[in-house]
Image (cartoon, grey):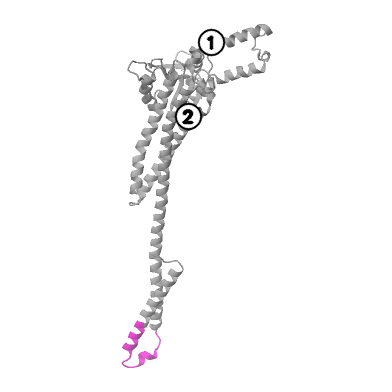
Amino acid sequence: MKLIGNGKQSPPHGIRHMELVCLEFDIVGNCALRRLTRAELLREARSSIREDFNKLKLIYSELSLEKNSNRFPLNSLNEKDKRGLLQFFRSSLQSRDIRQVDPAFSAKPALWVRHNAILVSLEQIRAVILFNKLFLFDPDNPKVQRAVKLISERLENSPERDIEMTGIPYEFRALEGILVNVCMSLEKDFSSLEPTILENLDDLPTRLTSRQLEELRSFKQRLSQFSARSQDVQRVLQEVLEEDENMISMYLTEKNTQPKHIRTPVEHDEVEILSESYLQIVDHLTNRAELLDNAIDDTEDLVTIRLDTIRNRILFVELTINIIALAFGAGSLVVGMFGMNMGIPIFKEENSSGSYFLFCSILIVSSVISLYWWLFKWCREKGLYST
């Protein structure tokens, strides 16, 4: 540790990340910048279910008096109470859960439901939703800044608000604001990506250049990244819909205002409708991305076929040149034999050299043409030469 100006020792490097910077939204959608530690965040979350914690304290006091012990007398509970107590603590917001929304840590996409809070980590939007507050972390992130206005509009209770929004609990309106922002972000990215890819796919079969092939590779990489993002959001929403207990636990306002009311495992219509509506949007985007990826694969197959055709044409020309060279090489052999420095009887006869020369020339040319034609026919029979 180092000394700071007042002579005190500065805290270790890791302690600087103990304080989290966030935007706090109140019950009517007003937001303010706030700094709070993990302990303060846990205290805020636990205050929303203070009655439940008071019950636990009462049980603790009674059992402590019976056992005359200062420690929590867990061994004095029956198995059913133990399981219920442990389940309560597991489903409450814990300090380790804060890592999911802490910008200092890399977190996977998730939507965790706790007894007193909802943790959201989707598309760089990290938030903790309580029954009367929303903490939105990493306010310097451009995606978070774009989401602030949209979330505020969903949270505010003005007379101009849609009548369908009236009566919806605060936590559902906050969650819907985040999901709307996530879906809009995915739609915007896909809308900017799809037209350019389709234009490139239309031009590629007619103009096959290395530049367009490089653009296609870059587009496919960006599309793969988008598919991974949309599939993560799709997976998170599907996991929420598959867990009835989690959907029931998302009614935070009801837990605070009507703590004695217990919902059945099928009483979660509002959460189910909310999750399904945005899951349909994400499913649609994911399916369109898959179709576009299949179109790119089909275009790559077409490009491969065209490149194979061009290569075959080059081999066709090369084989033709080799056959011609071989035929003329055979003729050159005959010419070379007649051009040797040797005495040939036919050239010693008078007035006959011209006739013999003409005869030999015709014979050589005919032999070259016959040899070329025979080699051409043989290559076609063997499948080495085609048009």
Can you give x and y, in whole percent of width and height, for residue 152 in the image?
Answer: 37, 20
Left or right side of 330 for 268? right
Q: Amino acid at mark 2?
A: Leu
| Residue 159 in view | yes
Mark 2 and mark 1 lie on one chain; the one further toward the N terminus is: 1
Q: Is residue 329 visible?
A: no
- Residue underneath mark 1: 51
Q: How many marks?
A: 2
Q: Residue at x 32, y 17 (%)?
A: 160
Residue 192 point in image, percent of width and height: 35, 37
Residue range of the region highlighted in magenta in the rendering: 341-362
On whether residue 360 falls in the magenta region, the answer is: yes
Q: Is the Cβ of the residue at disc 2 closer than 8 Å to that at disc 1? A: no
| Rendered view: 78 above or below 208 | above
Q: Residues within 10 Å of mark 2 (few under 14, many from 20)?
A: many
**In the image shown, does 367 or 186 lie closer to the viewer?**
186
Per the image, the residue denoted by label 2 is: 237
Callout 1: few (<14), some (14-19), or many (20+) C-alpha neighbours within 10 Å? some
